[in-house]
Amino acid sequence: MALVPCQVLRVAILLSYCSILCNYKAIEMPSHQTYGGSWKFLTFIDLVIQAVFFGICVLTDLSSLLTRGSGNQEQERQLKKLISLRDWMLAVLAFPVGVFVVAVFWIIYAYDREMIYPKLLDNFIPGWLNHGMHTTVLPFILIEMRTSHHAYPSRSSGLAAICTFSVGYILWVCWVHHITGMWVYPFLEHIGPGARIIFFGSTTILMNFLYLLGEVLNSYIWDTQRKPPSWQGT
């Protein structure tokens, strides 16, 4: 028996994301006042994705509790739709985007923090909030994967969806630059057009890889659990 029920964990994670979002939006940073506001940053978009995803998880848990034993076919049909939406969001958005944000942020930060998170931001964003945005996303999504099985969509439709998201965000970043004359991320100012094309292409490929990684990890976790121990025989 789990020490903490997964339903309680989901509520706690949802509340933590709500707190992180509220604290982040309360910060008066110059970048929040420019074109696109917080929505030009993938970190903020990811926080919204994670909050919506865990909100759907909590709603699914509540619906499951209310539907249990009712025998109402309409309620059961609505519950199945919620579960399908929850699973789709984890597969296509919550896992690949969340892992991407954590991995890319800390890799670039370790190389040269000024390229992704200038030291000036320490005056606005406390350390705990930085980790809430760029670190805890990974363990939270892994906890969710470990505690609940998620049915992935077909590989072709899943990859098409994550490609659409990736290309859409890249076009959004380019549009912000077109309007303001400034790139959302400082390191894009220091590389040439060819290098930017390679970077944007690489990020799309990485997103696709992370989608496949999530699919494999989900299958490994739950196939391993369902496989009977060898001592039980056939």
Image: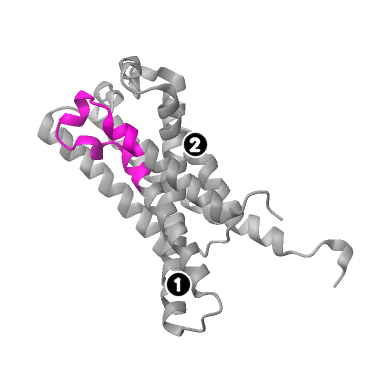
Q: Which residue in the structure is indicated by mark 2?
A: 136
Point out the image quarter for the C terminus: bottom right
Q: Please tell me which residue lies in front, 73 or 106.
A: 73
Mark 2 crowd level (few <14, some 14–19, many ≥20, 10 Å Cα): some
Q: Position of residue 186 (x, y in %)?
A: 28, 23
Q: Left or right: 176 with respect to 197?
A: left
Disc 1 is placed on an element classified as: helix
Q: Please tell me which residue lies in front, 180 or 196.
A: 180
Disc 2 is placed on an element classified as: loop
Q: Which mark is residue 60?
A: none
Of the two numbered discs 2 and 1 on the same chain, state the one appearing first in sequence. Answer: 1
Q: Quadrant of residue 92?
A: bottom left
What distance separates the C-alpha of mark 2 from that of mark 1? 29 Å
Please provide the residue range marked out in magenta.
Answer: 21-48
- Work out whether residue 217 can be spotted: no
Please say whether residue 99 is one of the residues in the magenta stretch.
Answer: no
- Work out whether residue 68 can be spotted: yes
**C-beta proximity under 8 Å, tags 2 and 1:** no
Q: Which residue in the structure is indicated by mark 1?
A: 79
Residue 87 vs 134, above or below: the answer is: below
Say what amino acid the circle numbered 1 marks. Leu
Say what amino acid the circle numbered 2 marks. Thr
